[in-house]
Amino acid sequence: MDIANPSDEHLMLREMIRDFVIEQVEPQALKHDRDEKFNLDLLRSMGEMGLLGLTASEEFGGAGLDAIACVIIHEELAASDPGFALAYLAHSMLFVNNLEQNGNHEQRSRILPNMCSGEWIGAMAMSEPDVGTDVLGLSTTAKKLDNGSWVINGRKMWITNGCIDDKGTPADVVWVYAKTGVNEKNKAEISTFLVEKGMDGYTVGQKIVDKTGMRASNTAELVFEDCIVPGENLVGEVGDSLIHMMKNLELERLTLAAMSLGIARRSLDEMNRYATERGAFGRSIRDFGQIQRYIGESWAKYRAMRSYIYDTASNMGLNNSGHRLDSDGVKLFATTAAKEIADAAIQVMGGYGYVAEYVVERLWRDSKLLEIGGGTIESHQKNITRDLAKNPDVLND
Ligand SMILES: Cc1cc2nc3c(=O)[nH]c(=O)nc-3n(C[C@H](O)[C@H](O)[C@H](O)COP(=O)(O)OP(=O)(O)OC[C@H]3O[C@@H](n4cnc5c(N)ncnc54)[C@H](O)[C@@H]3O)c2cc1C
């Protein structure tokens, strides 16, 4: 069995995306990284291909596909342009999949068709200037008004697709987590709101520039100042956000790991070709044992991450949680492995590896974000250790 293409449908999806990447993504990747520009038109064009609502229901314009399909698309996009892949992930996984799994029929039927076509661009806002990992400590508040609307106040930081251009145009719709009170255990009660462009008090604070990597995606600070959100834009019930986070973080971590896989594969491809073409001391450099170590170890890591990621994807349902151990595990292993493989590629390619034209320096810069975004590697270590204490039997499955 082909673990990465278990059905004809998966194989066709991969071939379609590979063609798209060769024709449309690769030619623009270097320039958009260099210029720190998000290619909005290219993302919108994926709507015509039916890829922006990969996991959304067909009745709302989606493709109704599974977690393996999500891995395939992120792996293929990131093998060329991880920054663009991150913008795709924020739209289709962090917003679209979240709404598909957790929204009510009115919210889904009104918003998802616009998201699947690419007319609207979406984002997810959890992190804040003072809070990332410690998500229950967030300080953005939402208070209910007598007329049933909500008023949101606070700032969100590091939001991918938070702005969609350099003029400060905000995302068309943002999935926002805000504190609505405290629960009976005196812990923060967090609720989810759909904030739409044009709602009073929703603006872009700043586009964050000079990032190390992922420069082809836009990252923004969002400001909510007495932002009025109608009652029907509350997702689920008050206090439901932990359920939303648990479900969607698993897919987010899996697809960030899939991006690492794309980075690893491309880095290996580049170093392998270069090692044959480059000569030194009258031989091809691939004849040197130290170069063989870079290539051999990278191959073994790449194959291990590929197996673990596709195995986790094949077990992951989209509408339930319960895969945290492995969604943390794949992201913990694959993100660092991708960074190490991109680093090995630069080393094998010497001075050429250090300049943009040879691609791997960009992959190396982009790979670093994957150890931070969607949960830091330290948070994965913490979660895995806690889950193994609760459920040690998993070691003997
Ligand atoms: C380019 C980019 C795009 C992003 N996109 C989004 C987005 O679309 N939406 C969104 O909501 N967020 C987004 N983020 C934010 C990202 O998810 C956070 O940066 C991440 O969760 C870490 O939070 P922090 O930066 O506040 O670091 P902190 O949580 O402050 O962590 C700082 C350090 O302390 C460590 N630490 C914290 N707590 C513990 C602990 N209990 N045990 C051990 N170590 C600990 C961390 O691992 C880290 O090393 C993005 C970030 C970047 C850089």
Image (spheres, rainbow, N blue to C red):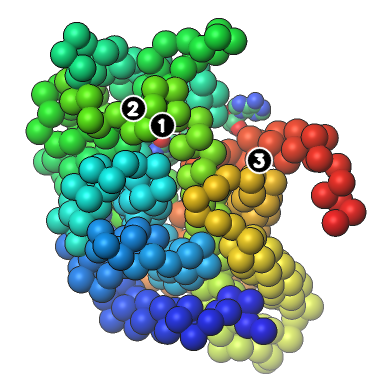
- Identity, as a three-letter code, of the amino acid under mark 3: His
Residues at badges 2 and 1 in contact (C-beta under 8 Å)?
yes
- Identity, as a three-letter code, of the amino acid under mark 1: Met
Q: Residue at x 82, y 35 (%)?
A: 389
Q: Position of residue 307 (x, y in %)?
A: 68, 69
Q: Residue at x 53, y 82 (%)?
A: 7
Is residue 338 in view?
A: no
Question: Assess mark 1: CB under 8 A from ligand 1?
Answer: yes
Tell me, for residue 156, which label it has, or none: 2
Q: Quadrant of the C terminus?
A: bottom right
Q: Which residue is mark 3?
A: 380
| Mark 3, other Cα within 10 Å: few <14 / some 14–19 / many ≥20 | many
Q: Residue at x 58, y 79 (%)?
A: 6
- Judged from this view, the residue extending furthest toward the front is 105
Residues at badges 3 and 1 in contact (C-beta under 8 Å)?
no
Q: Which residue is mark 1?
A: 126
Instruction: Using the image, determine if residue 123 lies above or below residue 237.
Output: below
